[in-house]
Image (tube, rainbow, N blue to C red):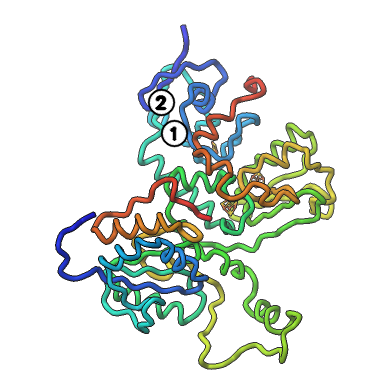
Amino acid sequence: MNKAITIDGKTLPFEDGQTIMDAALTAGVYIPRLCHNPELKPHGSCKLCVVNANGRNVTSCTMPASDGMVVTNNTPELNEDRKALVQMLFVEGNHICPACEASGNCQLQAAGYYLRMESPHFTHFYPPRRVDASHPDIFLDLNRCILCELCVRASRDIDKKNVFGISGRGIDSHLVVNSESGRLGDTNMAVTDKAAHICPTGAILIKRKGYTIPIGKRTFDQKTLSEFHLGQVKQPEPDGE
Amino acid sequence: MNNQARISKVKIATCSLAGCFGCHTSLLDIDERLFDLLGMVEFDRSPFTDIKHCGPCDIGIVEGGVSNAENARVLREFRDNCKVLVAIGPCAITGNVPALRNNIDLWDCFQEVYLYDPGTEGNQIPNDPELPLPFDKVYPIYEVVKVDYFLNGCPPSPDAIWNFLTDLIEGRKPEIDYKLLRYD
Ligand code: SF4
Ligand code: SF4
Ligand code: FES
């Protein structure tokens, strides 16, 4: 007998060890997300993927599916909450999309489009943040970092290099580089590393690639965030926990 | 098109604060639809008319953020006089490129531009009483006054502007098509 959950009334089978997000992804049901990438262990920090499961709000990327679970996902209430989260991410950093090389390829921006964000709504912080151009092939622009830790996880778990980390607490949390100088140029990060290509925003950019794909021909000019995310399939085994 | 007899035309005011006039230029790029637009609306204060102060209007369209005291004064005048206030373009909505100065000290900024920049002659920071007082930061207009609608895009495409304006003029809540919602 197959175990199953329902999401918005639709029945989806799942296997033991799968999260709600995994089950949804396998069935082609979209749950918005930013900090989750099926190639990496879930982290559960952005909260965009919050769904209601059996009456409680939970992060679907970390919550194991259990037989008979009743999940609501694509509701106006949850999508409004998601929009507010995206708006907070916009005002917490410095996101000047018209001047950003990631524009059109950026998942934060695409989340704004997907959720119909018309303005960042909240008061902008305009925080002072660092730009690190010390690496010969990679830019690190912390103005655009949303602290999703995808680069941290990719560097640690896939590249086995541990180039990135998060330091500080609460509003003072920030991305740090694991070298004595704190500069990316003084690490062994290579442009071929997974961590160099996993950032959902324009915080990590490859040098000398600027505007090789013109605005208007980029990822989210062709597809929505949901189409893009549903196309990302899980590559390694489900991490057996 | 709605052909109900219009007793008086819809009154629109527009201005550019800390913006580049790109949004206004994109409005002009609706091309021959400008004739339809002029059949439906009358412009009050706007760079198109050279009227200096905003009178009572149905729609106020503001491009650009608030960078100095004069911007704030004009923005308040628009809010006081316009039934519906629209922020057009990311400068009005987020501060955008002018807000790049927001985490640089204003005095450092001035020195860099007017004193140290190679090629500047006479090296003086402008200080004429006629010049509006600059603010420490550039603010999106919704952080200064209440804004009713936002039209994104740097600049919004002529089609986005046309759809938006015709919705508003004909009394509908503007619906921004997914394809036309852009922050860049
Ligand atoms: S990282 Fe994304 S949201 Fe931020 S400025 Fe660049 S395109 Fe815009
Ligand atoms: S640099 Fe990019 S991948 Fe790394 S934490 Fe920031 S947003 Fe996430
Ligand atoms: S995707 Fe689940 S918390 Fe970010």
What quarter of the picture does the N terminus of chain B occupy? bottom left
Cα gap from disc 1 to disc 2, whole angstroms = 9 Å
Query: Circles 1 and 2: CB distance less than 8 Å?
Result: yes
Q: Is residue A115 above or below residue B156?
A: above
Identify the residue shown where x is 44% and y is 19%: A12
Label 2, on which residue?
Answer: A7
Label 1, on which residue?
Answer: A51
- Residue A52: x and y in percent read 41, 32
Tell me the element at label 1: strand
Q: Identify which residue, A166 or B46, lies in the foreground.
A: B46
Subunit under mark 1: A
Looking at the picture, which amino acid does disc 1 mark?
Val
Using the rendered image, report if marks 1 and 2 lie on a common chain. Answer: yes
**Any mark on residue B118, and which?**
none
- Residue A116: x and y in percent read 42, 47
Closer mark to the observer between disc 1 and disc 2: 2
Tell me the element at label 2: strand
The response on whether ligand 3 sits within 8 Å of label 2 is no
What is the crowding at mark 1: few (fewer than 14 residues within 10 Å), some, or many (at least 20)?
A: many
What is the crowding at mark 2: few (fewer than 14 residues within 10 Å), some, or many (at least 20)?
A: many
Rendered image quadrant of residue B137: bottom right
Looking at the picture, which amino acid does disc 2 mark?
Ile
- The outermost residue toward the top is A1
Subunit under mark 2: A
